[in-house]
Image: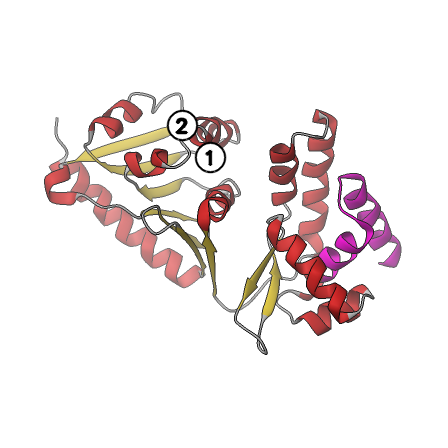
Amino acid sequence: MKKTENKLKESLISLGLSDKEASVYLALLELGRSTVSKISRKADVNRATGYVILDSLVNMGLAHISGKEPKQEYTAESPDNLVRLLRERKTKAETALVTAEALALELKSIQKKEDRPQVKFYEGIEGMKQVYEDTLTSSETIRAYAAVEDVHSLFGNYFPTYYKRRAGKGISIRAIFPDTPASIERAKLDSEEARESVLVPKEKYEFHPEINIYDNKIMIASWREKLGIIIESKEIAEAMKTVFELSWIGAKHVARK
């Protein structure tokens, strides 16, 4: 296992992480949800350094923090975020992106899965991007309630690329939109963006936080509060999927022709 860890560490360093960042990230993947003390001990760094490195990983979108001292805990974000990080930095060649995608698969094999439900909060513009990036890990069709005006109001340039990347990954989406002018225009691109849309009368069914349901997750994006939430729970996700299917039937019934 040590040989495998060394190889993974070298790969992480080649993608731009420092030696200590790579060590702490690997420790975090293997431990799952854990404290600074345990993570630092496993990564063989002192506690003060552990705090600094973990904050760096949080800022890169590779780790998530929950709770407050003395019960503060950290968890690793999906290794798929390595690809997003490289894409945002735009400092690596296309071959590095391919390397990162392959590495992400290896890292997932050592990532400890949490048995208990998880709720993660993300704040600000970058946090909002992170919750949308997580939807690109979906292994099934995404079910969504969304108001198009909201998602384009803060950084509209992000979404055309996001839609193309989602479609490029073969991830389709079924969406219920209030029938605003922006939603009507977006729906015209359904085929191109791997989406099936239903438009409902906005004066009766207007809503603003976007909700995406996929795999065992529910993503909530509140653009007005600049807050993103990801709930990971198989039971809750299954219940929300059932509710969506009922909503889908009702939405088609009241949809404007």
Q: Which residues are magenta?
A: 1-27
State the image quarter where residue 238 is shown. Answer: bottom left
Crowding at dot 2, Cα within 10 Å, few <14 / some 14-19 / many 20+, comes out as some
Q: Position of residue 110 (x, y in %)?
A: 71, 56
Residue flagged by tag 1: what amino acid is it?
Ile
Q: Residue at x 53, y 31 (%)?
A: 169
Q: What SS does tag 2 mark?
A: loop
Q: Are marks 2 and 1 in contact (CB under 8 Å)?
A: yes
Q: Residue at x 61, y 65 (%)?
A: 74
Q: Earlier in the sequence, mark 2 or mark 1?
A: 1
The main secondary structure of the magenta stretch is helix
Q: Position of residue 94 (x, y in %)?
A: 70, 25
Q: Quadrant of the N terminus?
A: bottom right
| Whether residue 78 is visible | no
Find disc 1 in the rendering and name its residue: 171
Q: Is residue 13 above or below residue 91?
A: below
Q: What SS does tag 1 mark?
A: loop
Find disc 2 in the rendering and name its residue: 194
Residue flagged by tag 2: what amino acid is it?
Ala
State the image quarter where residue 199 is shown. Answer: top left
Q: Residue at x 77, y 52 (%)?
A: 22
